[in-house]
Image (spheres, rainbow, N blue to C red):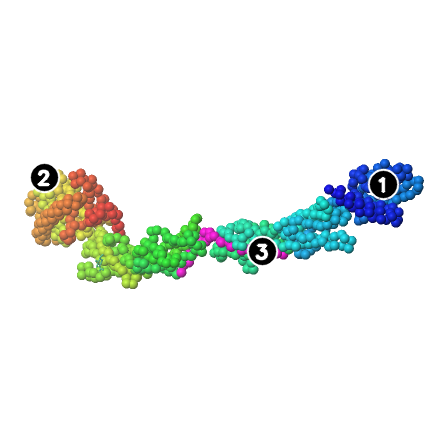
């Protein structure tokens, strides 16, 4: 396809050469493209020069050139020029646009030469190339649009249209190409930043620069442009959340991590290094929390107390080294813990309350406070049970302690009331307070005597002023209300005011005898003693005191018969025929004392003939103890001593004259001999009559006494039988109520039989006389088991 074109060009050149040959003598030009194969035809030189092959042969035509390399050879036989060596235009002419080989063809015989020019035309046999195949740039992401970066140019050995014609840069996201035509026809290639770079988006950008020539076919060369985007601190740190929330339990230990805030910075290196800090201006936050500079851990450095603050807002700042920042809020809710005990505040209290206080009297008012919330702050209070108080709850943690039952100082004079309060937290906390409440006294107790009645004994003939015994009353109240005074109550004894018998010491209750008592005049009396306390109004009680006067052996026996007259003589007659045991007479004596003191015994003290008479120890009967004989003197004189059983005993003596005779004249003759007895004789008759009368009287009296004693005993046994506690007093045979008072004497010398079964008696005999231990039948009847307190005064 190319050949016709070339041929035509050659023909044109040939035409020009012919024209020049005609004038300048033969100059031929050819034009061939470079890189033709060896032996390729360059031109038919013989024809173009108009020479015969023979001439070429004979003329030994040859090519003359100054160049060392011969690209073209002459074929003499064919008369053509052929390509001898491969012709590379780029080697031959480098950059020169017009490249031609100049040589001469020389002939001999005749010598002639022809100039031949072979123009070498370019073919696009070279592609554009870059000296380096990669260019590296480091461009900061902060570089602004319009920044220019000069690029390497591409080189194409070909010339003209076959040289570098254009450049292309791909991709075109960030950069555009700008070409400048230089004066030498070359182009300066520049890369211009169109759109800012973002390292965070793309850290490395690869671009391909392509250079193309204008040849047919077009050829190109490429170069890689590698752009490393350098970081600029163009990104601020960003928290993952604008607001963080966390909860922390109060009293958490220091160092507890509450939350972690996180910010990120897409920048690199120090531009992306984040430092956290707390920016709260209020000190309280910064005293309690700390943020780890590096990892954003927010931890406790102080005490956290729900009761002081329930929420914290912590402002955390994240900053990178470049000074860019972001901030976030950390809201910390503090959770309550049951760390506060209930507080018990006593609003008002009374320390003393009267024992007659009414029910529901308020003693103390209490306010409870628990700083915790919810269950932890719900408080319930109690007091110990079995107290006469209750704790009443009113609204809003107010309690009042009120009396719930009656108070009695005498039972409990003081209460320790412990109020315990518990909250409902888990575990529950509690506190307690102890209130001491004194109960004040009211005079609500009368004095009480130690005994329901008193009996005391005093021996007659006491000295006036003698203290007999003491009554005692106690009062359960306190102090003045318990100060007991004793008062003798007015009454009269035998018509005489009792105050002339006894007095009572107001303070001590000691009862004194005011006068000396005579048992023979007064045996007992009673009166009332009142005990009164010092309260207002005073309370009192009274008790009966019975004073029993005890007999003393202060009276000797008195002989009633035989009557002792001054000078008259009385004699008892004993017939000589009298048998043994003949009752001569009976000595009758009385003792106004009582009991042992009046228990008389009779003894023969002196006798004319001791062998003839005896005196009944107990009854005073004088009896013969042997047959009277004629030898016995008519006149017998007996001295009988009558002794009572007192301690010491008192006695009286009586002289009994006995006449042993069968007739009165015999007696007379005998007794008149007693000159010293003569004076008795005058009155003898009178005394005999008197003594008869007395004896008769005594006999009747004795009968009466015996009968009345019998009746009394019978009655008594009936009573005892009914009372089922038989007490059978046994009176000694010599018992006599000499004073005729008609009442039974209860002192001294009786035996008491006590038994639970009247048929089987177990007897206890009180020892008479010497013992001062007395039991009255009254007491035995009343209360056989009660210990008796008997006071005896000497
Ligand atoms: C009350 O407490 C006080 C002091 O602890 C104590 O001395 C007193 O005996 C207590 N009283 C009662 C009635 O327990
Ligand atoms: C003595 O006490 C009794 C009750 O024990 C009472 O009935 C009486 O009135 C009192 N007598 C006087 C004089 O106070």
Q: Examine the image and state in which quarter residue 755 appears.
A: top left
Q: Earlier in the sequence, mark 2 or mark 3?
A: 3
Q: Which residue is mark 1?
A: 46
Q: Nearer the viewer, residue 742 or 270?
A: 270
Q: Nearer the viewer, residue 471 or 207?
A: 207
Q: CA distance from mark 1 to mark 2?
A: 247 Å
Q: Residue at x 85, y 45 (%)?
A: 28
Seen in the picture, residue 487 relative to 231 is either above or below; the reply is below
Q: Nearer the viewer, mark 2 or mark 3?
A: 3
Q: Nearer the viewer, mark 1 or mark 2?
A: 1
Q: Residues within 10 Å of mark 2 (few under 14, many from 20)?
A: some
Q: CA distance from mark 3 to mark 1?
A: 94 Å
Per the rendered image, the range of residues in magenta is 323-347
Q: Is residue 205 magenta?
A: no
- In the drawing, what numbered circle is on residue 579? 2
Q: Residue at x 33, y 51 (%)?
A: 386
Q: Which residue is mark 3?
A: 326
Q: Residue at x 20, y 43 (%)?
A: 754
Q: Residue at x 75, y 47 (%)?
A: 162
Secondary structure predominantly adopted by residues drawn in magenta:
strand
């Amino acid at each position: 396809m190319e050949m016709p074109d070339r041929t035509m060009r050659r023909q044109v050149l040939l035409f020009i050469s012919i024209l020049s040959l005609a004038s300048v003598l033969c100059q031929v030009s050819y034009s061939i493209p470079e890189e033709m194969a060896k032996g390729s035809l360059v031109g038919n030189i013989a024809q173009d020069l108009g020479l015969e092959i023979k001439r070429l042969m004979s003329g030994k035509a040859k090519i003359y050139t100054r160049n060392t390399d011969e690209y073209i050879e002459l074929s003499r036989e064919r008369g053509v020029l052929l390509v001898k060596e491969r012709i590379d235009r780029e080697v031959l002419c480098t950059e020169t646009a017009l490249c031609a080989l100049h040589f001469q063809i020389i002939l001999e015989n005749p010598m002639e030469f022809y100039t031949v020019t072979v123009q070498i035309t370019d073919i696009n046999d070279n592609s554009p190339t870059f000296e380096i195949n990669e260019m590296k740039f480091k461009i900061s992401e902060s570089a602004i649009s319009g920044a220019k970066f000069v690029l390497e140019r591409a080189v194409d050995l070909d010339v003209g249209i076959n040289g570098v014609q254009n450049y292309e840069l791909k991709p075109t996201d960030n950069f555009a190409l700008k070409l400048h035509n230089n004066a030498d026809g070359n182009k300066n290639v520049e890369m211009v930043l169109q759109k800012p770079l973002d390292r965070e988006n793309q850290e490395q950008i690869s671009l391909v620069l392509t250079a193309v020539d204008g040849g047919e076919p077009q050829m190109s060369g490429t170069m890689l442009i590698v752009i490393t985007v350098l970081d600029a601190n163009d990104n601020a740190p960003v928290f993952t959340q604008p607001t963080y929330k966390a909860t922390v339990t109060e009293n958490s230990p220091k160092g507890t991590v509450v939350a972690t805030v996180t910010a990120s910075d897409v920048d690199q290196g120090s531009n992306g290094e984040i430092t956290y800090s707390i920016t709260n201006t209020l000190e309280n936050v910064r005293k309690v929390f700390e943020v780890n500079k590096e990892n954003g851990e927010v931890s406790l450095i102080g005490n956290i107390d729900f009761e002081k603050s329930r929420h914290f807002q912590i402002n955390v700042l994240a900053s990178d080294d470049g000074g860019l920042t972001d901030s976030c809020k950390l809201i910390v809710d503090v959770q309550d813990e049951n760390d506060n005990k209930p507080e018990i505040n006593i609003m008002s209290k009374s320390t003393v309350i009267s024992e007659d206080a009414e029910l529901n009297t308020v003693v103390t008012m209490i306010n409870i406070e628990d700083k915790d919330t919810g269950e932890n702050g719900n408080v319930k209070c109690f007091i110990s049970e079995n107290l006469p108080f209750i704790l009443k709850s009113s609204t809003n943690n107010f309690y009042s302690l009120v009396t719930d039952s009656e108070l009695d100082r005498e039972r409990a004079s003081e209460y320790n009331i412990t109020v315990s309060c518990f909250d409902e937290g888990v575990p529950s906390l509690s506190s307690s307070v102890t209130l001491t409440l004194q109960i004040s006294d009211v005079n609500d107790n009368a004095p009480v005597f130690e005994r329901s009645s008193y009996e005391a004994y005093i021996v007659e003939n006491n000295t006036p002023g003698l203290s007999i015994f003491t009554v005692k009353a106690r009062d359960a109240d306190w102090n003045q209300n318990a100060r007991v005074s004793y008062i003798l109550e007015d009454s009269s004894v035998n018509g005489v005011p009792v105050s002339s018998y006894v007095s009572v010491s107001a303070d001590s209750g000691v009862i004194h005898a005011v006068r000396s008592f005579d048992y023979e005049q007064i045996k007992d009396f009673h009166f009332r003693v009142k005990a009164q306390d010092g309260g207002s109004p005073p309370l009192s009680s009274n008790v009966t005191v019975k004073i029993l006067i005890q007999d003393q052996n202060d009276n000797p026996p008195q002989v009633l018969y035989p009557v002792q007259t001054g000078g008259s003589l009385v004699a008892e007659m004993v017939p000589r025929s009298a048998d043994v045991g003949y009752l001569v007479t009976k000595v009758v004596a009385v003792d106004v004392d009582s009991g042992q003191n009046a228990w008389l015994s009779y003894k023969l003290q002196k006798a004319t003939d001791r062998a003839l008479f005896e005196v009944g120890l107990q009854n005073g009967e004088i009896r013969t103890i042997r047959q009277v004989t004629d030898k016995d003197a008519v006149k017998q004189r007996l001295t009988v001593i009558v002794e009572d059983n007192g301690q010491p005993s008192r006695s009286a003596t009586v002289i009994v004259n006995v006449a042993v005779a069968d007739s009165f004249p015999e007696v007379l003759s005998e007794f008149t001999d007693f000159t010293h007895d003569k004076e008795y004789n005058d009155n003898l008759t009178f005394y005999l009559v008197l003594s008869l009368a007395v004896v008769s009287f005594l006999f009747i009296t004795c009968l009466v006494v015996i009968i009345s004693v019998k009746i009394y005993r019978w009655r008594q046994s009936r009573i005892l039988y009914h009372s089922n506690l038989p007490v059978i007093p046994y009176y000694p045979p010599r018992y006599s109520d000499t004073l005729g008072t008609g009442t039974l004497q209860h002192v001294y010398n009786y035996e008491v039989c006590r038994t639970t079964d009247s048929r089987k008696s177990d007897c206890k005999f009180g020892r008479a006389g010497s013992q001062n231990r007395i039991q009255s039948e009254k007491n035995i009847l009343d209360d056989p088991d009660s210990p008796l307190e008997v006071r005896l005064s000497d």
